[in-house]
Image (spheres, coloured by chain):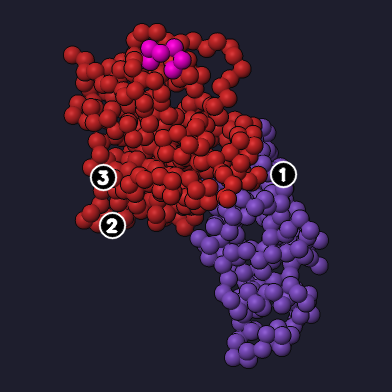
Amino acid sequence: MTYHIAIDVSSVLRRTVCELYSNLVTRPTGATVRRAIEEALDGLPEPNVTVIDFSHVTLLDFSCADEIVGKLLDAQQRADGRPRTYFLIRGLHEPYLEAIEAVLERYDLAALVLDPTGNVHLVGTLDDGARRAWHVVRQRGAVQVQDIEAELGEPSVPWEEVVSQLSSRRLIVRRDDGRVALPQAS
Amino acid sequence: MTTVITVPPSLDDQTLEQVLDQLAPLPADQKVLVDARHTRWASPYGLTALLTIAQSRAERASFAGPETEETASYWQRAGFYEHAERVFEMHGHVPRPRGHAGESQVLLEITPVAKSDDVHDVVEKIQAKAQTILVNELHLDPMATMRFAMTLSEVCQNIVEHAQTTGWVAVQTYRYRQRLGRRVVVIAVCDGGIGFRRSLESAQGRKLSDRWDDGMALEDAMLRGVSRFRDPGRGQGLAGVRRYVGKWDGKLAIRSGTARIALIPSWDEDIALREGLAPFPGSQVQITIPERVAKG
């Protein structure tokens, strides 16, 4: 069973930094919010898909994007063992998305973003093969590695490794039935 | 003995150099009178730089403000006198607030920035006015308000993170007749802190090249996104500011120490890197965003 959790970043900001603030600006603010999110994640049941929701944030600057998204995802990426927490980012206005993309590039990270219609998009840095495999998973739903190979051809590409890379980067979920799928918001 | 420093009739980022040239030969403890009696106009950069000059003097500097009522009144509404009285010894008439509804050209009065909370306050204040000015009057896209506030936040944080002293920020809009004949919105952020070169020098394990100077420090920070912090996420603020300014066909200029670097749009003829300027502590940033005109 996968648990589904949503973290409203605006509420975290008001609770941890200042009741009056609605802007995610400055590094100290971002660091405080990230620590609060990390504490919340520590107590969550696993495996889980956690939606980081920026919908009610009035402003997100580059420094806060780095402190919250960059450092949070980087730390998770470095953690040992099989991924137990998957992230979806929601509520990003175009400028916030630009800031987050810039951050992800710096860390050589990729992340999943939910658009207003609920579609999942891949942002950040990922090599071409992994990106194409991810799009097959997105298009077809739960698939076997062989399905990806059949779809994309190129038998010389080690698709199992590509899928492992996508899984370790938390961009797809390995299911108990051996298939892989995108993390779902709920 | 007091040395009189004459402020030119029009004070902006270019003519400020005349003021700094006069200050350069003087020891910091030399008493000076900054004489702006004949000044008729000052950009937000000029006004915040005057406060920074006061900050840089070991002996409290004196200040004589514009004799023209209109100019003095505008400087008062821009918030200059409120801070000038704290950092200068004032001479002559000091205009007082008249309780009017505020100056429409002033998006953000001169505001001190020393800590992160100040950046929050600056961003909160600007958001209310920015939408009207940027979208309705300068015809920038609707997302420009967010990008503008993000830009402002990052340049203000530069003070908090690197200056190690109080700086000032101001945002105004005016018609830039000299080069554009269009309206512009101008962000000025000035501090008298340690500046880019010393900030980057403080990075642990940083190797300095033979040519290491203020100009190279500015190139590193602005063009290569170098920061004194080793963390990979650092240096993004200025990189983001550059991207946005480019997107708006705007101009970004940063002066620090004896050098000045600029990202120059097609409508301007400035020099990309000027070195050997009169020394001035800290960093002075100016962002100029022009009104968007329909291409036709």
Q: Say which quarter of the image contains residue B139.
A: top right
Could you tell whether B22 is left or right of B46 in the image?
A: left
**Chain with colour purple in the figure:** A
Q: Is residue A75 visible?
A: no
- Name the amino acid type tagged 3: Glu
- Name the amino acid type tagged 2: Lys
Residue shown at 30%/19% (left/top)? B34
**Residue B125 drawn at (x, y percent):** 59, 30
Asked whether residue A55 is drawn in magenta, I would say no
Give the secondary structure at mark 2. loop
**Chain with colour red in the figure:** B
Question: Which mark is on residue B293?
Answer: none
In the image, is residue A118 above or below residue A32? below
Distance (Cα) linking label 2 and label 3:
22 Å
In the image, is residue B204 above or below residue A162? above
Q: Which quarter of the image is occupied by the N terminus of chain A?
A: bottom right
Could you tell whether B58 is left or right of B263 in the image?
A: left
